[in-house]
Amino acid sequence: MFAEVSHLELLQGIALTILSVTIIAIIWGKIDRSAVAIFGAILMVITGVLSDIEAFNAVDWNVIVLIISMWILAGYFSKSGIPELLAHKAVGWSKGSLSNFIIILGTMAGIVSLFVDNILVILIFAPVALHITRLIKINPVPFLVFIGLCANFTGSALLIGDLPPQMLHSVTGIEFLSFIWFQGRPSSFIILMVTFAAVLLFFKVYFDKKFRGKMEILTAFEALEPTPRNLQIDKGFAAATVAFFTATIIALSLREIIGLRLGAIALIGASSMVLFMETAGRRYKKPSFEDILISLDWRAVLFYISLFILIGGINSQGLIESAAKAISPLLTSNDYVGVTALYWITVPIVGVLEHDAYILAFLYIIKDLAAQGAIMPWPFYWAILWAGTLGSNLTVAGAPALLAALNMCERDKCKVGFKEFIGYSIPFVLVSVSVCYLLLMVFWVFI
């Protein structure tokens, strides 16, 4: 008996060490985070924490297929010319005001990020912002940082926007429409959109002061190449892209009626679009399927697979159950204290820690506590999802989308200092987490 306990403790120590070192290496950032995560997942198998079969089963392949399928759809959409057209239109809609322009760009980035990976959103909107700021000779940093913050903000509003809501679906089985209205209360979409509106209002006032009201940009808009008048958009390709994308989203929302898993529905949608584009859509000016596959972020896919294996490793050795027992007194005293503690502890942690791993670990902890009858889980699920998403905007370490935005700045020979970055990120995070916390309390704790 003693030997068995010692062996279990040894495996627990190994699993915890592998996870901790992997997370530290990811935060350190000197080695590609996907490579680090893959190596950590392999170590879980080599050291005997998981068997190869257990490692395979630890991955939620439904979520992985969902991610890849939606990225294929988003890849076609991003190359349709529609996002670029909208970004150019934003200049006209701004009526010459730089503050209006940056708010409109941020709003567009946030809306598109509801359905499209946030890094892809950066790659869509940032080049337009860079081009315009270059023409009118102003600092592009506020524009790119704000686009990055907005793109990262809304990913958890719906099930398909980012990994955290997909992990919530994996752990709890929550459906697409439940992200809009759930258990008779507004849930992620409504709560985060109201919060987003509050953030946009705050920054509208901020940018009005920063840019001193209006600054003429319409002349620069006319100088853009291409302008909306000669932007090359194949209307047939654009219409087909929107049709397949919309049909897939509608099908995802009707999953319970259709009776298929989300990954299967998304795969059918993506496969149908690919088949159409490679046959009937040949007359369109469109990217090849090979181009779409090349544009996918396969490193991110491997990172997500490795993440499931890493968390599966500590879960298999009972560490999540032990963690649940350890924090149970804090979370179970009452809902107000427990949710508040979890929320505000999470915000600073995910600002410096890769938030996907943190969120997934706590989703399992909350599930374990709920299974014990210690808590009503959903206020805690929403707390970890929303605090984990919004808090990750604090630094580049918490959100890869922000790193993508800063990299584009640097490629444009515009260095972004830490002080300048947090000058935008701190107020953005403070406003968003404060408003979201109040809504969380009102609708999910007090009611």
Image (cartoon, rainbow, N blue to C red):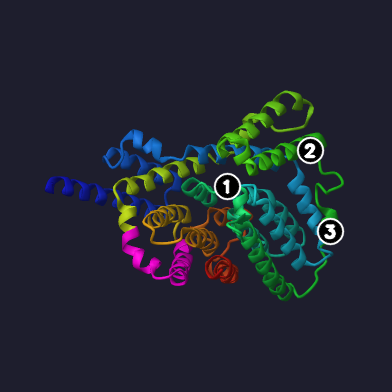
Of helix, strand and loop, which mostly describes the magenta segment? Answer: helix
**Left or right for 77, reference 310:** right
Residue 99 lies in magenta, yes or no? Answer: no
**Residue 266 visible at all:** yes
- Indicate the quadrant where residue 245 lies: top right
Mark 3 or mark 1, which has the lower sequence index? 3
- Residue type at mark 3 is Gly
Mark 3 and mark 2: Cα distance apart in space: 23 Å
User: Where is residue 140 shown, x and y percent of the image?
Assistant: 67, 61
User: Where is residue 336 shown, x and y percent of the image?
Assistant: 47, 71
Q: Give residue 175's mark.
A: 1
Mark 3 or mark 2, which has the lower sequence index? 3
Residue extending furthest top? 279
- Residue type at mark 1 is Glu
Q: Which residues are magenta?
A: 324-352
Query: Considering the numbered disc 3 on the image, is that residue within a helix, a strand or a loop?
Result: helix
User: Where is residue 20 shown, x and y percent of the image?
Assistant: 34, 54
> Where does label 2 land, which residue?
239
Mark 2 and mark 1: Cα distance apart in space: 28 Å
Q: Nearer the viewer, mark 2 or mark 1?
A: 1
Mark 3 and mark 1: Cα distance apart in space: 39 Å
Asked if the residues shown at circle 3 and circle 1 are in contact, with their CB atoms under 8 angstroms apart, the answer is no
Query: Considering the numbered disc 2 on the image, is that residue within a helix, a strand or a loop?
Result: helix
- Residue type at mark 2 is Ala
Q: What residue do we see at 76% from left, 75% from top? A: 212
User: Where is residue 327 shown, x and y percent of the image?
Assistant: 35, 64
> Where does label 3 land, which residue?
92
User: Mark 1: few, some, or many residues within 10 Å (few <14, many ≥20)?
Assistant: many
Mark 2 or mark 1, which has the lower sequence index? 1
Q: What residue do we see at 59% from left, 36% from top? A: 259
